[in-house]
Amino acid sequence: MEYENKHGLKRTIRGAVRVAMAIAGGAFGEKYKQPKFIENSAQDSLYRKLTQMVDEGKFEKAENILWERAEKKDLLDLQLAAAVYSYMNEKEDTFIEQSDFSREEIEYGIRCVMNMYGFDA
């Protein structure tokens, strides 16, 4: 049962990320296109920095930066958040747990960011 719950939650997060990307960039599909923020070198650099933090197990630190940026209500930052949460979601459960984070926190995070932009996820 736990296996089904974790994979169900992973699919739920994937769905929330797809909705966020559709809202922010108009792309809606199983695999979204490269986010527009990648075209902006400053945003791309921040994306790389945040994904490196995730790779180092610093999920919470990366999330705090995403939440700070979301306060500005820039749709590029919503795309950035969706891409980073998607990246987090693809990590193995054991790695997420060893990093003192959880898949539930990933789901909560993407939903909170979307709520900050005025969208109910």
Image (cartoon, rainbow, N blue to C red):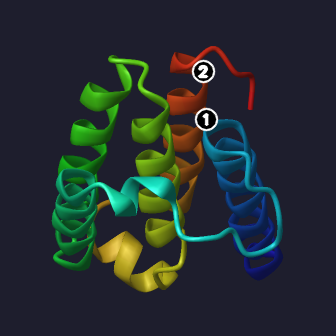
**Mark 1–mark 2 CB contact (< 8 Å):** yes
Against 20, residue 117 (above or below) is above
Q: Residues within 10 Å of mark 1 (few under 14, many from 20)?
A: many
Secondary element at image label 2: helix
| Number of numbered discs | 2
**Which dot marks residue 92?**
none
Q: Position of residue 17 (x, y in %)?
A: 65, 53
Q: On the rendered structure, is 14 left or right of 81?
A: right
Going by the image, does 48 lie left or right of 18?
A: left
Where does the image place residue 22, in percent across and percent down from the top left?
73, 46
Between 6 and 110, the residue placed more toward the observer is 110
Q: CA distance from mark 1 to mark 2?
A: 6 Å
In percent of width and height, residue 60 lies at: 25, 49
Quadrant location of the C terminus in the rendered image: top right
As shown in the figure, which amino acid type bears the numbered disc 2?
A: Asn
| Occupied quadrant, residue 5 | bottom right
Q: Nearer the viewer, residue 20 or 16?
A: 20
Where the N terminus falls, by quadrant? Answer: bottom right
Residue 111: assigned label: 1
For label 1, the SS is helix
Which residue: 16% across, 76% down? 56
Residue 77 or 62: which is nearer the viewer? Answer: 77
Q: Which kind of residue does numbered mark 1 sit on? A: Arg
- In the image, taking residue 64 as reference, residue 21 lies left or right, namely right
**Residue shown at 29% from the left, 54% from the top:** 40
Q: Position of residue 96 (x, y in %)?
A: 39, 72
Query: Is residue 44 left or right of 105 when viewed as pictured?
Result: left
The residue identified by callout 2 is 115
Q: Which residue occupies 22% across, 71% down?
A: 57
Badge 2 crowding class, 10 Å Cα cut-off, few under 14, some 14 to 19, many 20 or more, is: few
